[in-house]
């Protein structure tokens, strides 16, 4: 049930939309799950109207698929989808790391080091939610420090897809320890101000993930969902 704070003056439909969106992105609502209005309304303690409005908005964002005479479903994500996301992310974040190496301010570098340390602590503790949180913050810090508004806006468009992918990835693959070393290579290159090394380290980081995704079968994740989209 939603936590209704009397100090929160946002419209109910916005809170319902944000809650359902986050549940889809984090995997609390799994890909392919039917979005039953009555059940969701009961769970969140609201009427069906804001649920219906949220589902329509999520459909426009590609997170929900509405099938004629069958209902609404959390959109599927395939291995092919993940590889396409990684291809774009590899190029954009490599460029962001290149710029950040010469443009990152000392306070942001300290912040990046802190996120790297906290990621490592989360790994030792086996805290998957914190691993995802600090992996996200580590890469976000680099993007924020590239000081290129166009690039930042382009990467922001990927953020929700990347977040959804992270939850699938961390639940399926055991790469957390390797990622610590890869983060350190990126961090060290940025700290030295070595633009080319930063870009190369970021590129290798994503490329290794692409290779793993391409070679590993992910339970419940099809190789492609394009056949379904043509029906």
Image (cartoon, rainbow, N blue to C red):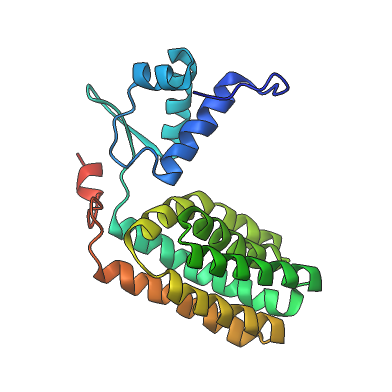
Between 131 and 153, which is closer to the camera in this rendering? 131
> In the displayed structure, would residue 18 be above or below residue 228?
above
Between 60 and 177, which is closer to the camera in this rendering? 177
Between 170 and 14, which is closer to the camera in this rendering? 170
Q: Position of residue 229 (x, y in %)?
A: 25, 43
Image check: 172 left or right of 104? left
Quarter location, residue 142: bottom right
Quarter location, residue 94: bottom right
> In the displayed structure, would residue 118 be above or below residue 157?
below
Between 135 and 160, which is closer to the camera in this rendering? 135
Residue 193 shows up from this direction: no
Q: Residue at x 47, y 73 (%)?
A: 179
Q: Residue at x 64, y 64 (%)?
A: 143
> In the displayed structure, would residue 74 be above or below residue 114?
above
Q: Position of residue 231 (x, y in %)?
A: 19, 39
Q: Residue at x 48, y 70 (%)?
A: 90
The residue sitting at the front extreme is 125
Image check: 150 left or right of 20? right
Image check: 161 left or right of 216? right
Q: Position of residue 29 (x, y in %)?
A: 37, 37
How many marks are shown on the rendered structure? 0
Q: Position of residue 42 (x, y in %)?
A: 41, 17
Residue 190 shows up from this direction: yes
């Amino acid at each position: 049930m939603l936590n209704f704070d009397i100090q929160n003056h946002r419209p109910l439909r916005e809170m319902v939309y944000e809650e359902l969106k986050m549940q889809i992105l984090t995997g609390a609502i799994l890909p392919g799950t039917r979005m039953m209005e009555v059940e969701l309304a009961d769970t969140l303690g609201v009427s069906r109207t804001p649920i219906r409005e949220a589902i329509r908005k999520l459909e426009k964002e590609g997170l929900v698929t509405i099938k004629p005479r069958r209902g609404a479903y959390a959109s599927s994500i395939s291995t092919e989808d993940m590889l396409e996301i990684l291809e774009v992310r590899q190029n954009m974040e490599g460029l962001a790391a290149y710029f950040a190496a010469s443009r990152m301010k000392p306070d942001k570098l300290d912040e990046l080091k802190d996120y790297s340390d906290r990621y490592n602590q989360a790994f030792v503790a086996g805290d998957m939610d914190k691993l995802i949180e600090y992996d996200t913050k580590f890469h976000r810090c680099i993007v924020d420090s590239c000081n290129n508004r166009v690039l930042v806006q382009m990467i922001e468009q990927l953020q929700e897809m990347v977040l959804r992918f992270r939850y699938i990835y961390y639940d399926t693959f055991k790469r957390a320890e390797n990622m610590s070393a890869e983060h350190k290579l990126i961090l060290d290159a940025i700290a030295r101000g070595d633009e080319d090394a930063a870009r190369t380290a970021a590129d290798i980081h994503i490329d290794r993930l692409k290779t793993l995704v391409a070679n590993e079968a992910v339970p419940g994740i099809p190789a492609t969902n394009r056949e379904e989209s043509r029906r």
